[in-house]
Structures are given as C-alpha cells and as structure tokens.
Amino acid sequence: MAKTFLKIAAVYITLGVLLGMLMGIIQDFRLASVHAHLNLLGWVSMAIFGLIYHFYPHAAETRLAKLHFWLHNIGLPLMQGGLAIEILSGNSAMLPLVIVSSLLVVIGVILFTINLFLQLGSTSVKQAKNKDLPG
C-alpha cells in the first residue's frame, strides 16, 4: 500500500500544480480552493500516509488501510470535481455530491487513525517488552 499511496500522491500534485498554472495563465482564481485541496488532501496527506505505511508495513497490510485508500481516492476526486462544477456554474446542485464525498474522505481518515492506533500500539508494546528481555 505504501507505494500505491505515494504514486497516487504524485498524480495529485501534478493535477494541483497544473490547475495552479492554468489559474495563473488565465488569471481566474475561482478554483483556488480546489487547487489547495488537491495539494493538501491529495499530495501532502497521501504522501504522508504512504511514508507512514512504508515505515510500518504491517499497518499497510490491513483491510483498514485498503478501505482508507479507496474511500480517500473515491471521495477526493468526486468532492473536488463537484466543488469545481459548483464554483464555475454558480449552481448548488452539486452540493449533495460534495457533502457525501467529503464524508467518504473523513471516514477514510478516521479509519487511518484507527488503523494506526491498533497497529502501532501493539508494535510499541511488543518492542518495549523485547527491550526489557535479557540477552
């Protein structure tokens, strides 16, 4: 999962930078929030998730990690696509999609947190016990 998170993070930074460049070229910054979310929730968060899963591979092998990945990567593009359409059209018809997809991302992040607490908590205890053993 670590490599998958890092690869998709690279896709998000590419999209975020291209959107930023496009906004600068056409001098229309209405999509600045979409640009920021792609960079923060896409690039930064996904890269951090990937690095954490690289250093704690047992956490990356869980069903929670896989579910987190899919919830985040279904929710984020739908949320940002819906938000972009809403901003550009001035129509709030996409609001339900934005809300539901935002909830997918939030649930994914909560699952990530639960996964870390479950996996890292047990590892820390095991490592501490092993350090106390003689030999």
Image (tube, grey):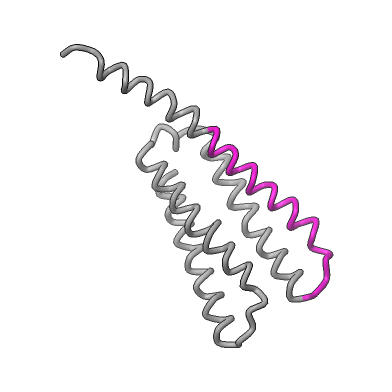
Quarter assignment of residue 55:
top left
Report the number of discs: 0
Specify start and end residues of the magenta stretch as a single range: 89-114
Q: Tell me where residue 96 appears, x and y as whole percent.
A: 80, 56
Left or right, residue 109 beside residue 101: left
Which quadrant holds the C terminus? top left
Q: Looking at the image, is 86 positioned above or below residue 67?
A: below
Q: Does 92 lie within the magenta span?
A: yes
Q: What residue do we see at 58% from left, 40% from top?
A: 67
Q: What residue do we see at 44% from left, 26% from top?
A: 121
Q: Looking at the image, is 128 positioned above or below residue 3?
A: above
Quarter assignment of residue 124:
top left
Q: Looking at the image, is 123 positioned above or below residue 4?
A: above
Tell which residue pokes out farthest to the left in this image: 135
Q: Tell me where residue 13 appears, x and y as whole percent.
A: 48, 65
Q: Does 7 lie within the magenta span?
A: no
Quarter assignment of residue 33:
bottom right
Which quadrant holds the N terminus? top left
Q: Tell me where residue 28 appears, x and y as whole percent.
A: 64, 83
Left or right, residue 115 beside residue 85: left
Tell which residue pokes out farthest to the top in this image: 134
Q: What residue do we see at 71% from left, 65% from top?
A: 83
Q: Tell me where residue 53 appears, x and y as whole percent.
A: 41, 41
Chief secondary structure of the magenta portion: helix
